[in-house]
Amino acid sequence: MNEVSEELKALLERDRIRRCIERLARGEDRRDAELLRSSFWPDSAIDFGVFAGSFDAYRAWVVPGSPAIPVTQHNLGQTLIELKGDTALAETQVTSYHRVNMGEAERDTVIGGRYLDRLEKRGGEWRVAQRTMLYDWFQDFGVSVDWSQGVMGMPFSAGHYTGKAAGDFSEVFFGKAPAAR
């Protein structure tokens, strides 16, 4: 019975770690400072290659976000987690979409890579203590189309379908913002 309880404990710890990584991705996409804060320790170090710094500098970089990048979406793949007591090492596959305003036009880009996270459990809570981004591939799909009024030639029946960070309907859905009247 002891083996099962240790195995179950490890399974629960891995689930808590995955939820932390999921909160972090949502925090980046929604530019939500509280979700980011709940995912990183205040003394964390972050290195994306194009940005490296402390948690405070990272948060200021992500929230409110660059006007040059009006839309992002981070899709997480499998996560390999190695538990080592109150420390864990995790590698998470990520595919991220970014609409980038290049001045004359907006472009759609996609990055494939991996997050290498060292997480620490402090006070019973898992958060990222160090994150490094590894880039495996990049694709620039060219000038973006304006899909804000509909997709595939069909108009949206209401204004809440686009997933922009500001005014995102998912905030209403989760009860974090009032419904529009």
Image (cartoon, helix red, strand yellow):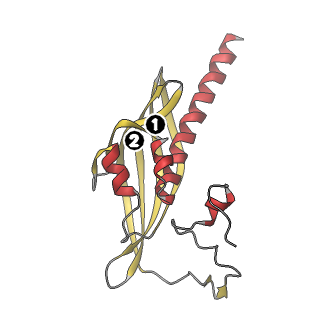
| Location of the C terminus (image quadrant) | bottom right
Front residue (pair 175, 84): 175
Q: Quadrant of residue 177?
A: bottom right
Amino acid on which the number 2 mark rests in the picture: Leu
Front residue (pair 173, 128): 173
Q: Is 141 left or right of 7, judged from the image as shown?
A: left
Q: Is 53 left or right of 128, judged from the image as shown?
A: left
Residue located beneath label 1 in the image: 90
| Location of the N terminus (image quadrant) | top right
**Visible in this render: residue 12?**
yes
Percent from the top left, x then y, of residue 116? 40, 41
Amino acid on which the number 1 mark rests in the picture: Ala
Q: Which label belongs to residue 116? A: 2
Q: Residue at x 35, y 43 (%)?
A: 55
Q: Residue at x 36, y 66 (%)?
A: 66
> Is disc 1 in contact with disc 2, using a CB cutoff of under 8 Å?
yes
SS of the residue under disc 2: strand
